[in-house]
Amino acid sequence: MDHPQRSAMAWDDTSSAGFSDASVFQWTARLPSEWKHVNFEKEVANPKSRLRVLKRLIQLKTMHDVLFDGQTYLSKPVQNSFSLCRFWQNENVTNKEVFVLSVNFGSRPVNISIHDLPPFVYAQKHMNLDSQPNPYLEARILAVSSAVHPDSWYTQQKFNIASGQLELGVDQGILYRFYVT
């Protein structure tokens, strides 16, 4: 199939892919090859499916204006990984919520640096990051890709971003939020 992204998604793994009660269904040849394993019924049932992650991202976008109207910064790609940052910036002052999507499309685990993200640079220059405990160094994970193992990252997990580094495994992505004032 030339463009699998333009094909129909099977409803289930039955012989007719959920489109018909007929025993013979002609359209299965036009479905992506993995339709028996990736179909709507299985995606809805799996809490880490691509469908569930997409629904969570859409929900977050409707709840947080910064994801729609904020400034965007794309980090330099390193070893098939990068971070995308959305934040508010007024007169070179970063404030409020900062959302970061860090992804690793590579075939090896990678340490991703967030040192070059403008909100992190601003926090290092203008905030007392040495005070302990420091709420500005705490990020919370909002969504993870289906390849993320729960032993490494999970939704609602809090983690410290003081080092400016985080490790992502193969084909992993996480969306997290921290605050800068």
Image (spheres, grey):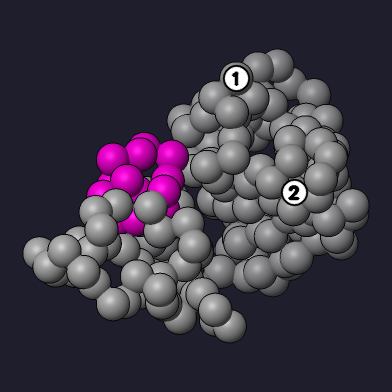
Q: Residues within 10 Å of mark 2 (few under 14, many from 20)?
A: many
> Which label belongs to residue 104?
2
* Name of the residue lying farthest toward the left: 21
Residue 80 occupies quadrant: bottom right
Q: Which residue is mark 1?
A: 151
Alpha-carbon span between mark 2 and mark 1: 17 Å
Q: Amino acid at mark 2?
A: Asn
Task: Decide: is 71 above or below 144.
Answer: below
Identify which residue is drawn at 47% across, 57% down. Answer: 34
Image spot of residue 177 (x, y percent): 56, 44
Q: Is residue 155 visible?
A: yes
Image spot of residue 41 (x, y percent): 26, 50
Task: Decide: is 18 above or below 157.
Answer: below
Image spot of residue 107 (x, y percent): 81, 45
Identify which residue is drawn at 10% across, 64% down. Answer: 21
> Which label belongs to residue 162?
none
Of residue 33 and residue 129, the one placed in the foreground of this image is: 33
- Answer whether residue 9 is magenta in the image: no
Range of magenta residues: 37-49
Secondary element at image label 2: strand
Task: Decide: is 123 above or below 151.
Answer: below
Relative placement, left or right, of 98 versus 132 is left
Of residue 180 and residue 58, the one placed in the foreground of this image is: 58
